[in-house]
Image (spheres, grey):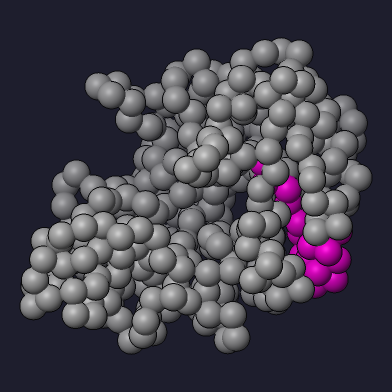
Amino acid sequence: MASSNGIKGGYWLSKQANIFPPERIPTSYFTHIFYAFVGVNATNGKLIISKSQEIKNFMTKVHGGHKKALLSIGGPRSTTENPSTAISVVASDPTKRAAFINSTIDEAQRYGFDGLDLAWEFPETQVDMDNMATLFEEWRSRVDDRQAELLLTASVYFASEIPRGSQSITYPADSINLNLDFVNLILYDYTPTTAAHAQFHANQAYTGSGDRGITSWSNAGVLANKLVMGIPFFGKKWTLLDENDNGIGAPVVSYDGVVPYNQIPGASNGTYDSSTISQYLAYETSWFGYDGKNSITEKIHIAKRGNLVGGYFVYALGDEDSQGHTLSKAASDAWDN
């Protein structure tokens, strides 16, 4: 199960390997590092492994730093694909589900991974959720039968329910408690307006926030030591309507997309907002909402001191400043102190 000292997780993205290769991972600030992502073949249920040497390089770095390495399966949708589609197909079919489970264990053992992470982002129906519960149960059973000694984890929506039209679909909290070592809560991407997309406290009734997400999972019955809070190393950019009206919630002309922390100009000098526990930066008509050293430190302090979670994870390692690793260090120091 999760370490008594807590989880300090970090996602390393294979797609960023050319600009942030495995050897640059700052392993000293982490306990668990995720190789992200590999896909699933919807036809036969098996994992799609295409970068064997890259995985070996990753394992050399992570195990060389005496940290745990986990293989993350799935991931967020892109403009060209949605990994959740294949996962949904496989989870719904007993034969494919069994093939998937055996394939994950085989590949984990082949490369020496310490665990497996299902990044199903996100289920679309309650049937998907029910199939997820069955998958987790069968996954844990097969790992135990094969004496594989693998951690089993999942990346999940910020709250225990996902809105789908006029209804909501509910995660299988009982199966998660029984079969997973921990779950990574995606505590970001809350809001489409100029606001802190990873805010810990919401300043409006209808927006998501870290504390609301954690409370939702706790109310669903998932143990606090199995909840791992997500922290983004990326921000979001908007174009302001009026550069003089530039606080949180300011009117905008457009949303301009995701921006890595290391590409936000002057990010270390942004404004810290204590009401939401977030940071933002306004430069002429450009507006960035993100997490910086101050907000990361404070939200981790609140969560740990309140015994709300069993750790944190960051996404993604290649998005922060790659020289001083300011954000990784801030998170690690906050958890330890």
**Residue in front for this viewpoint, 240 or 331:** 240
Determine whether, in the image, residue 44 is placed left or right of residue 199.
right
Q: How many marks on residues?
A: 0
Residue 181 position, x and y percent, is 66, 43
Span highlighted in magenta in the image? 56-73
Determine whether, in the image, residue 295 is placed left or right of residue 11.
left
Residue 279 position, x and y percent, is 31, 73
Give the image quarter of residue 87: top right
Give the image quarter of residue 318: bottom right
Asked if residue 250 lies in the magenta stretch, the reply is: no
Determine whether, in the image, residue 85 is placed left or right of residue 5.
left
Asked if residue 66 lies in the magenta stretch, the reply is: yes
Q: Is residue 61 above or below residue 176?
A: below
Determine whether, in the image, residue 71 is placed left or right of residue 296.
right
Q: Is residue 278 visible?
A: no
**Residue in front for this viewpoint, 243 or 309:** 243
Residue in view at x 44 percent, y 75 percent: 263
Residue in view at x 46 percent, y 62 percent: 232
